[in-house]
Amino acid sequence: MSKTNAGRFFEDYTLGQVIEHAVPRTVGEGERALYHALYPARHALYSSDVFAAQSGLEGSPIDDLAAFHVVFGKTVPDISLNAVANLGYAEGRWLLPVYPGDTLRAVSEVIGLKQNSNGKTGVVWVRTTGLNQMEEPVLSYVRWVMVRKGNLDAPAPETHVPELAGVIAPEDLMIPEGLDFTGYDFALAGEPHRWGDYAVGEKIDHVDGVTIEEAEHMLATRLWQNTAKVHFDATFRPDGQRLIYGGHIISMARALSFNGLANAQMIVGLNGGAHANPCFSGLTVKAWSEVLDKAETSAPGVGAVRLRLVAVSGGDAFTLKGEDGKYLPHVLLDLDYWALMPL
Amino acid sequence: MSKTNAGRFFEDYTLGQVIEHAVPRTVGEGERALYHALYPARHALYSSDVFAAQSGLEGSPIDDLAAFHVVFGKTVPDISLNAVANLGYAEGRWLLPVYPGDTLRAVSEVIGLKQNSNGKTGVVWVRTTGLNQMEEPVLSYVRWVMVRKGNLDAPAPETHVPELAGVIAPEDLMIPEGLDFTGYDFALAGEPHRWGDYAVGEKIDHVDGVTIEEAEHMLATRLWQNTAKVHFDATFRPDGQRLIYGGHIISMARALSFNGLANAQMIVGLNGGAHANPCFSGLTVKAWSEVLDKAETSAPGVGAVRLRLVAVSGGDAFTLKGEDGKYLPHVLLDLDYWALMPL
Amino acid sequence: MSKTNAGRFFEDYTLGQVIEHAVPRTVGEGERALYHALYPARHALYSSDVFAAQSGLEGSPIDDLAAFHVVFGKTVPDISLNAVANLGYAEGRWLLPVYPGDTLRAVSEVIGLKQNSNGKTGVVWVRTTGLNQMEEPVLSYVRWVMVRKGNLDAPAPETHVPELAGVIAPEDLMIPEGLDFTGYDFALAGEPHRWGDYAVGEKIDHVDGVTIEEAEHMLATRLWQNTAKVHFDATFRPDGQRLIYGGHIISMARALSFNGLANAQMIVGLNGGAHANPCFSGLTVKAWSEVLDKAETSAPGVGAVRLRLVAVSGGDAFTLKGEDGKYLPHVLLDLDYWALMPL
């Protein structure tokens, strides 16, 4: 028994601790094809090497969210195996495109700790960095989780709640070297709407819906080597259902958002996000977006747009929270991100 | 709302109109592997780079039907999002093999229009061409669909029904450059039956069956970036079922036909086809073929065989239509195609 | 009808007969990605090209079991289409790593025959060899199956039961050329336990479980071009269930065994194996292992460990057989293999 990983408990984390996550992963054309099979992904930059080259990149990168999932998956055995809840994300930045053939690994630093007043759980904040085979950081984000204590008698650590930016400043977004949208082909990309056509406050109903199947979310979650039991083992929960990995809903909603945001090509920042309600198979996921902000960038023809992406299953159009300030039951995801769009 | 694609209605099409379809797609080894996972595909030319090279090609191409699906998928947002029915195919020709790394896009020309007498729908004929990154046509076919009118007051266009060949003449079939079956290895291909062994009128029951799952047809349909709602959204139809993309049945039946037609290696012509009845998950698909014609070709060791491929779910062997001339309820697909086979 | 493969019956086999199996298969990055989507596979050598290179290989090979499945799949139409039962494996040795781009085919020799006393079935032993495009053997194993007689009047062949080694001698295991674990990174591999930390007789409960879905086992089985009807056709069995390919359970259990055996990197020998009970969708598969033996090897830093891998669905921990010597009903698989591990 002692040879298996029981996961870390709250008392196993210390401030400043650096955790090198296991199992580096080479990603390639197979992962790209599977991403297109698992999600209705159509953003042209991730579909066509030619379109990507015409945009100044060396080829079509692995989808930004696929890169995120691979890095996230590496952290699960060390961070969230005993997590009660995935509480939030902040300060997420994509730093370099990931190309087929790249090998990713992940490192996390514990940047915050706070034991809960019940003495049974605590909140752990980690800043995770994804690195490629050149040891270059490709992705960095903060997430915080509520973790069970293994030994209730373990002393509470000194509370340290990190100060996190609510929004990444546009000037801190990393634009991939060479990216150039001045020759952007809107017809091939699928929609005529450019950066200037979107107004802050505008809301877009993405219309399409996808009904979720057990086989599909498990294929996806395994692909990212995310091993949390609740996603795979129907005997783990009393109700016999498998909780769907929150990242599956992020990717599904982002892919659905093509219809209305086809030109929000690259994700470069993750300002925050909440998995508002759990998702289970049989639900039909739809999505809507709200334009939260817009900014210029230094890259030719490239603007940045800050978007709220909401995944829902049922409910009234554009509804999010009740009068009590809590997410309504039909809301699955509320994500706040920066994307790059042609001017 | 106005930013999303509502699809085109009948009055949005004009004769001679050319539509450049969006989202080019690079296909590769991942798509090839997924094709083998989704369908019981075993034709040696598409399974082995070595077998393909020994047949004079540069390597194993992407399955002909996968190339078809990718091109077809591109046309859906522009042609069939508001389609009531996919009525038929004609004059389909594969013009160049598609190899891993190729990037495909699609262009359609409206070649026929006919408003129905009810004034609510009309038939649109389009000739679609798939192009690779060299702008070389790889595939061309005509299909016609019944489309709803968006504005019932829109005037009816002048009726123009295109003249279409019922069958592609053998001399118009494109044989891939270099294709040579003189050194064909029948043992490795899986069956000893050569072109000369098949007789016009011969029928073959392909024996094997596959029961269809929701997760599988959705993975397949998404892989081809076909976004028609009815394939994915269980809430779209009153009965809660997801209509299966007709192309999924084409690929399933073609793969099943290996057992008896293992040497019908390459599909080079699509003379016609009807999705006789809709297919839903839980049905078990089987297939039978009929040899409709045979022809010689200019390539060494290569003959052409014209085949009817019928997909069924239940029903008596080799039954197709009732006394009223309509397809029997168990018939899912009736396809008429040309394939290349060793002499 | 006569053009389809009805499979071979017991009387169709003769001692010394060599069967060249059809449909060579090029495996690549797509198959690797699908393997990670289908199984919770995390062994670092098969996940990261960098980790594999640091271990002295040219890159990350195709998973050893994926290579096995491809070779096995080729044999199904000739060996087990009319099999009543897959009785056992022996003398399995992996001889060369399979790399993306390799093309595999399979050849079997009939090495044993024994008609059963009922006169209706017989046992066929075959030694199957997988070959790559250089005609180098990559894998060799013996399996025996019970096959129906097609013609009950066919004379019984002379009985010949081959002498098979119960266990492959450690000195007969093939270590991939260049393999070197002296610089092994245990942190990246995921666990600190080295060869010296495992004791003969030690048992490990791998903790995690995966609930099996129809779509997933069919995707896997098709990927290996295994066409046995019972895996795909819900109408084939009276109870409407699809029997899951035994190899799916082998791969699932092996992947689950990462948790406790993360450093049992490469499978090099298959001493024996029994599919103790059939598996159907809806069951939740878990696994445990027992260390049966240990041996040194000639490669730097590389030890060999002989493991029993047991897949179960329910049942008490570490239980295997009842007092009658028969497998308990919850046992799905009992596999005996050699793996390579860092010293």
Image: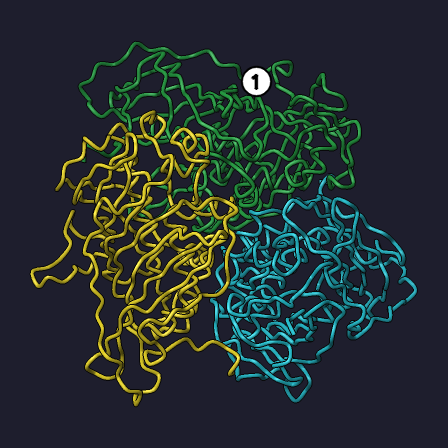
Chain colours: A cyan, B yellow, C green
- With B222 as the anchor, is C310 left or right in this view? right
Q: Which image quarter: residue B233?
A: bottom left
Is B252 drawn above or below residue B196 in the view shown? below
Q: Who's the residue at 50% across and 63% down the image?
A: B23
Q: State the SS at label 1.
A: loop
Q: Is the C terminus of chain B in the top left, top right, bottom left or bottom right quadrant?
A: top left
Q: Which image quarter: residue B72?
A: bottom left
Q: Where is residue B201 in the image (x, y as percent from the top left)?
A: 12, 42
- With C117 as the anchor, is C192 left or right in this view? right
Is A315 drawn above or below residue A48 in the view shown? below
Q: Name the foreground residue: B151 vs C137.
A: B151
Report if residue A145 is visible in the image. Answer: no
Is A232 drawn above or below residue A191 in the view shown? above
Q: Who's the residue at 73% across and 27% down the image?
A: C199
- With B335 as the anchor, is A219 left or right in this view? right
Q: Which amino acid does the dot numbered 1 rest on?
A: Val
Q: Mark 1 points at which residue?
A: C167
Q: Which image quarter: residue A310?
A: bottom right
Q: Name the foreground residue: B4 vs B17.
A: B17
Q: Where is residue A235 in the image (x, y as percent from the top left)?
A: 55, 54
At label 1, counting other C-alpha atoms closer than 10 Å, the crowd grade (few under 14, some 14-19, many 20 or more) is: some
Q: Residue furthest right?
A: A158
Q: Position of residue A2 (x, y in %)?
A: 74, 40
Q: Where is residue B96 in the image (x, y as percent from the top left)?
A: 39, 46
Disc 1 chain ID: C
